[in-house]
Image (cartoon, helix red, strand yellow):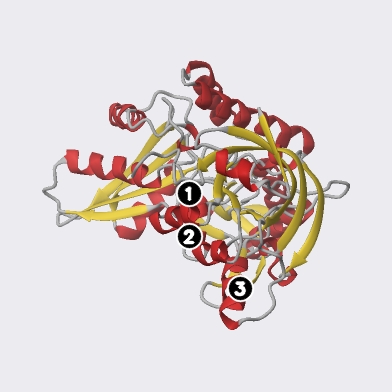
């Protein structure tokens, strides 16, 4: 058994808060740059320029890329040969909280969703998974709620045509329209159960968007960009930067599909301990 | 590019057209979900409002914590449609301009036209960039709700695009 201390986990989590919120993912930056270069509409081009400038300022001046530093969602892949001295979840929560405080990110988290009241920095939402090996991989995805509010799920009939599924995904993007900071990255989860498809849709946002993607991902991207919603919803060829789909086996009686949209500031950072 | 200042010149506001880009200098107030709820409750109860709404500019924004040595943290716009239910009453009470991102409801569009108000959008998801246009910050009310407090901001050449003009024209078309 390899020992990893809770203190080490806490420090790593705090550092992820800094990296995820100040440094835009390189694959996202590259996609935004490509969009800027290829965009023909003048206003859309100006907006993409502002988005690129914003990322540069955030990195240089150590400011949050977006004031909505999100609900911190943490994916913890814990190797089964690791022995943790201390409390894993407490260490992640404490570390992210310390990072959010230290780097002056936003306290957007409410202890009680109905009572509302004063907001704080924690807890995170932790998805822990047991994997092979003797390491721990932590990934922080600060998910802003402008785009999280546009999430959609649907339980299709198992005999549904794939075109119905495609239309549902495109409709979800259309209904987000200009509200959730396009150009979007569209995460899609297909299969599993209702809740699991939603998790898959979120996990899809962790995949790099630098590759070309599958045939279905490419088709959906093309159709989404044909909507002409464009950057900030003010028209243009770039409504989405990428579509990423995650699938899982499902039941003979159903076909769960979820869409989790990310704004153009798709932020995440990972570390392996 | 055209420039506007606060206090707003109401004739100039009426002359602005959806799609026009301009730069705003002067005083704006941040207010988002809970601040709107509280203001509307105060109006309905007839209690004191913490800001003078007459000809005011409200910015739908909840900044990050303020980093040491800086005026303000990241401070971009939040989704305007969440404020739609509260907006018509604020327009009745004198609110003139709003800054946010995204579409508004038909009720809000009608109220903007009726009261000769205006709705602007600004660079969405660009809070670090927009922080550079803020020159002064003062907490005015609701400090207990942290990022949802009402802040008085002094801004210089803050970039705006007219999204819904005083005649009801919309950058998003007729939908």
Q: CA distance from mark 2 to mark 3?
A: 14 Å
Q: Tag on residue A214?
A: none
Q: Residue at x 71, y 65 (%)?
A: B52
Residue A39 place in picture, x, y as percent = 48, 20
Q: Secondary structure at mark 1?
A: helix
Write down the residue under mark 3.
Answer: B38
Which is more toward the observer, A5 or B66?
Answer: B66
* Disc 1 crowd, CA 10 A, few/some/many (<14, 14-19, 20+): many
* Residue bearing mark 2: B84
Vertical arrangement, residue A177 with respect to residue A14, above or below = above
> Quick one: A214 or B27, which is closer to the camera?
B27
CA distance for labels 1 and 3: 25 Å
Residue drawn at the location 48% of the way across and 49% of the way down: A147
The single residue placed furthest to the left in the displayed view is A159
Residue bearing the label numbered 1: A147
Q: Secondary structure at mark 3?
A: helix
Q: Residues within 10 Å of mark 3 (few under 14, many from 20)?
A: some
Residue at (60, 25) in percent of width and height = A49
Which of the 4 image quadrants contains residue B155? top right
């Amino acid at each position: 058994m390899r020992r990893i201390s809770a203190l080490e986990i806490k420090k790593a989590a705090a550092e992820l808060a800094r990296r995820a919120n100040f440094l835009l993912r390189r694959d996202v930056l590259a996609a935004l740059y490509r969009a800027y270069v290829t965009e023909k509409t003048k206003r859309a081009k100006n907006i993409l320029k502002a988005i690129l400038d914003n990322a540069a300022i955030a990195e240089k001046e150590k400011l949050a890329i977006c004031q909505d530093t999100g609900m911190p969602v943490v994916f913890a892949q814990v190797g089964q040969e690791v022995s943790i001295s201390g409390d894993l979840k407490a260490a992640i929560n404490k570390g992210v909280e310390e990072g959010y405080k230290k780097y002056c990110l936003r306290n957007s988290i409410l202890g009680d969703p109905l009572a509302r009241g004063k907001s704080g920095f924690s807890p995170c939402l932790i998805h822990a998974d047991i994997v092979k090996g003797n390491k721990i991989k932590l990934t922080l995805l600060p998910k802003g709620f402008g785009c999280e509010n546009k999430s959609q799920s649907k339980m299709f009939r198992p005999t549904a045509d794939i075109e119905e599924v495609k239309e549902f995904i495109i409709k979800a993007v259309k209904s987000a329209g200009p509200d959730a900071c396009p150009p979007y990255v569209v995460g899609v989860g297909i299969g599993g159960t209702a809740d699991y498809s939603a998790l898959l849709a979120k996990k899809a946002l962790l995949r790099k968007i630098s590759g070309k993607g599958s045939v279905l991902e490419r088709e959906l991207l093309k159709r989404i960009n044909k909507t002409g919603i464009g950057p900030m919803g003010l028209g243009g060829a770039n409504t989405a930067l990428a579509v990423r789909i995650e699938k899982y086996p499902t039941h003979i009686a159903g076909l769960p599909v979820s869409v989790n949209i990310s704004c153009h500031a798709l932020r995440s950072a990972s570390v392996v301990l | 590019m055209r420039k506007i200042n606060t206090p707003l010149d109401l004739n100039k506001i009426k002359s602005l057209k959806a799609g026009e880009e301009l730069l705003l200098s002067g005083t704006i107030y941040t207010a988002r979900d809970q601040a709107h709820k509280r203001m509307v409750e105060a109006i309905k109860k007839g209690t004191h409002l913490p800001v003078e709404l007459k000809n005011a500019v409200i910015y739908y924004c909840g900044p990050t914590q303020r980093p040491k040595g800086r005026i303000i943290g990241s401070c971009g716009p939040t989704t305007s449609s969440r404020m739609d239910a509260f907006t018509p009453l604020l327009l009745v009470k004198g609110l003139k301009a709003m800054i946010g991102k995204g579409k508004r409801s038909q009720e809000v569009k009608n109220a903007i036209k009726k009261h000769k108000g205006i709705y602007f959008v600004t660079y969405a998801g660009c809070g670090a960039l927009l922080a550079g246009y803020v020159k002064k910050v003062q907490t005015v009310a609701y400090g207990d709700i942290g990022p949802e407090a009402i802040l008085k901001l002094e801004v210089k050449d803050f970039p705006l695009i007219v999204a819904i003009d005083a005649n009801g024209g919309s950058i998003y078309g007729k939908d």
